[in-house]
Image (cartoon, grey):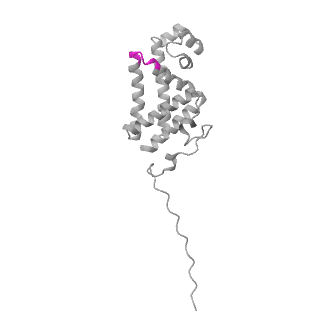
Amino acid sequence: MTEFAKGGLNGTSTSAIAKRVGVSQPYLFRLFNDKKALFLATVEYAFDRVEERFRRATEGLTGYPAMHAMAHAYHDFLDTDTDTDLLRIQLQAYAAAEDAELRSEIRGFWNRLDAFAREVTGVDGEELTNFFARGMLCNVIASLDLPRNRYFDDVLSADGKLLHCDLCEDSERFGEPPAPEPPAPELPASAPSD
């Protein structure tokens, strides 16, 4: 994954991959028919990891709470140093999709992620488009190391930490009942008059 993340399909040699994982190049081709098959297996793994994060984040949730949980999970995914290769693999996959054979397979991985998001949230149309569009913007921000507050200054501080989240603060949108009004203080019983 690290080699493909750096060089993409066309810029990565199978000998570099074999060397990195400590196997011979012929052994690599006993496991995978060709370099494209190895690349697709790597891309599928990356998409599976994102879906796995979404599944864990949405456990027991539906609707907007699920969408919100997926958004936070994706931010966490991008913030984790160990997952930078997963982000780069996604970007390399989109670049490699100029190959019609690869495009079909990569489209299938995307469609599976899209179907999961639709199923768990129950939304589609503009709301789902906005969810994925913000995710793609997050990819660009992460890959170019741009300051997040340039685009999300209403919810992020200069160092990228979450300041507040409208969805977190909107309990009704999550289907939770509003906080109960505090009971009125009891007035002391008045003393009987003489």
In the picture, the quarter occupied by the N terminus is: top right
Q: Where is residue 72 in the image (x, y as percent from the top left)?
A: 52, 39
Up/down of 167 relative to 143, above or below: below
Residue at 57 percent of width and 40 percent of height: 156
In the depicted structure, whether residue 50 falls above or below residue 34: below
The image shows residue 177 at horizontal and vertical percentages of: 45, 55
Total labels: the figure holds 0
Image quadrant assignment for residue 5:
top right
Q: Where is residue 100 in the image (x, y as percent from the top left)?
A: 38, 16
Quadrant in which residue 79 is drawn: top right
Check residue 85 for magenta coloring: no
Q: Residue furthest left?
A: 125
Residue furthest out toward the right: 159
User: Residue at the bottom extreme?
Assistant: 194
Q: Quadrant of residue 127?
A: top left
Q: Which residues are the magenta region? A: 95-102
Asked if residue 62 shows in the view, the reply is: no
> What residue is drawn where x is 53% and y is 26%?
87
Main secondary structure found in the magenta portion = helix
